[in-house]
Every structure is written in structure tokens, then in C-alpha cells.
Amino acid sequence: MAIAKARVAQAACPQSRPAPTRAVEHRPGRSFSKAAPLTPRELLFLQRNAGNAAVCQLLAERADTRAKDQQSTVQRGFFGDLWSGIKKAAGAIGSALSGAAKWVAARFGDAAEWLVNLFRDLPGRLLRFGKTIADGLIGMATLIPEAIGALIHGGVAGFARWVWEKAKGAGAWLGTLVSRVFDLLGGPELVEFVLHMVSNASPLSSTERTAAQGVLGPNALRWDEVRIDEGGVLGLVFKLNQGRAFTTFHTINMTATDRSNLSIVVHELTHVDQYEHAGSVYIGQALGDQIAEGSHAYDYGGTQGLEDAAKAGKHYSEFGRERQAQIAQDYYTDTTNGGQTSPYEPFIKELQKGEL
């Protein structure tokens, strides 16, 4: 291809040939000479030569321009790609550094929150600890009289039933005592600090907060401290509990599918409310109900059950932990769908007062 182009250039731009010369006539007595006029053949030769020279110059200039443009394009493409790669790398590094900085800031926030809550919640935790100790002392003081009464009125079988009930009560009391000590030491905050190290929990959205505040009350709990972890390290628990959401202190562990259902978010935030008002003991109470009753731990009898409970003078705090949360969830659902809500109202009022 290059050889063909060279041949075309040589044909278009031949080497300049000398123009034919004419003899100059010298006349005696003249101090100048005068060239003879050109013949038609000579004139045609000069015109052809001049035209070829102009064409050759134009082709040369065009070839030079194309060469420069090609070089500029190649250089621009190379440096453009290089600069684009540098910008992408810088963006990736910047995003990574920004994410790391946010993560570190969040962990410092968790550490500060642990210290703040340790002192802020200390009076309430001390009060609950003292009450638990008092309950244990009262139970021990009444143990012997109750045993005698059970034996007298129920015989051996009645006494055996009494012993079994007292054993269960003692186990529950011991579990409550352990949870009270755990709270006094700031255990919940410490556990959440560690779990947040290996998870990517996010705060409540404005929609989630608004939905829950309509049920629990606007000042029911410390909304800014609540986090939702869609999996994380505790996501393994989903494989053991059929994918059901669960709450550990201020952290709700749930799948993305459950999170899209606001009624479930309200249910789990009720457990957060239980934690803030009753302490970490709510976890053992909820698990105990689930182990003892299975799925029936959530069954409160629907609106008819609530009407019957209200007539019997039952309070919201007397329902199990899962039933409390289910009442709040169903109230949100019926309120949203325009269902009957009057049976819920006495119990929701107690919930909003913090009577859990």
C-alpha cells in the first residue's frame, strides 16, 4: 500500500525538468539583450510544470496535516485513557477512605454511647436490681409457710406441684438476677459495640420511625440509637429460627424482606421499648414463652380476646413479651387498613405510658 502511494506521488509530482532554452540575439551597438518570445510549445510546458508544482505542494501540505492529526489523536487517546484510569483509581480510594472514616466514627460513637448509657441508665438499672433482690428475699421468707400450706391442702401431690412451680420460679428469678447484673455492667452496650464491628447496621428511616411512633408514642424510646442489621454476623440465627426477625437491645436483626413490612418493624421496635423499660431480661422472657408455647406465644385471641381481657381487668403488662409486640403490630396493621381499633385502645394507651 505504501509503495503504491509513493508511485502515485512520484507520478503526480515528477522531478522538475529544465525548461528549453532559447538563443538570445545580440545586436551590435546595443547595451542590452532581449529574450526571444516563447513558442506555443514552450508556453504549454511552463504552464504544465507550474500546475504540477502547485498540486504537489497541496498534497504535501495535506499529508503533513494528516500526520500531525494522527499523532495528536494517538497522544490524546493515550493520555486521556491514562487520566481516566487515574481518576477512577482516585475515586475508588476516596470512597474506601470515606467508608473507613465513617466506620471508625461510628465505632467511636458506640464507645461514647456505652459510657453515656452506663451513667444515664444507672439509676433505673439499680432500682430494678434492688427490686429483684427484694423479690428473692421475700420468696425465701415465705418459702417454709407456703410449703407447709401446700402439703396440708394438697397432700403429697399438691406439695409436689408446689415444688415444681417454685423450682421454675427460682430459675426465672436467677435468670432475672443475672440480667440485672449484666445491665449494671453495661453489658448490652458492650455487646452491641462488638456486633457493630462485624456488621453494617443502619439507623431507622423516617418512614419506619413515623410508623412506630404512631403506635408506641413519639417519645417511647431513644429512636436515634436504634439500628437495623439486615443479616450481619447474627444472620446465621435466621437459619435456626425459620428466618424470623429478632431484637437484641437496640439492634433489630431482620431480612430485607421483613424490613419492607412496616408492621414487622413496629413489632420489633416494641421489643426495643421493652428493653428500655424492663432491661435485658425481656430476651429471656420472650425466649421462655416461645420455648413453652411455640407459635401460640404470639396469640392473644385477636380483637375478641382483647375485649375479653379488658372486661376481666387485664393490663398490657400482663401479656407475654411476644403477645405485647403482636398487639402493637396488629394495631398498626388495622389502623393502616381501616380495621377495627377500639379493642386495642386501652392496651395501646398503657403501652404508650411505658407500662410494659
Image: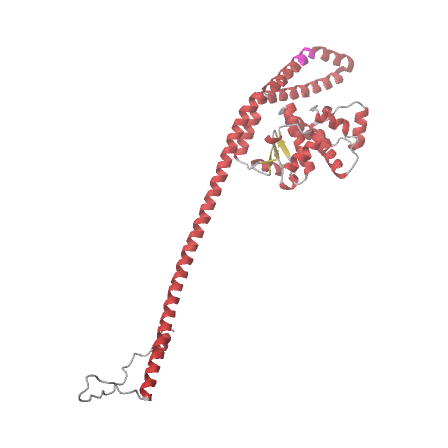
Quadrant that contains the C terminus: top right
Which residue is farthest left? Answer: 29
132, 2: nearer the viewer: 2
Give me the residue at 70% from left, 11% from top. Answer: 142
Is the stretch drawn in magenta largely helix, strand or loop?
helix
Quadrant that contains the N terminus: bottom left
Q: Position of residue 305 (x, y in %)?
A: 79, 30
Q: Position of residue 228 (x, y in %)?
A: 60, 35
Q: Position of residue 317 (x, y in %)?
A: 72, 24
Q: Is residue 237 left or right of residue 56?
A: right
- The reply to whether residue 165 is visible in this rendering is yes
Depicted 269 relative to depicted 3: above or below: above
Depicted 255 relative to depicted 354: above or below: below
Q: Position of residue 35 (x, y in %)?
A: 25, 85
State the colouring used for the structure image: secondary structure
Let me know if residue 235 is in the magenta part: no
| Residue 252 occupies quadrant | top right
Q: Is residue 101 left or right of residue 299?
A: left
- The reply to whether residue 244 is visible in this rendering is no
152, 168: nearer the viewer: 168
The mark total stands at 0
Give me the residue at 74% from left, 33% from top. Answer: 331
Depicted 140 relative to depicted 312: above or below: above
> What is the magenta range?
137-143
| Residue 314 occupies quadrant | top right
Q: Is residue 26 left or right of residue 49?
A: left
Give me the residue at 79% from left, 25% from top. Answer: 310
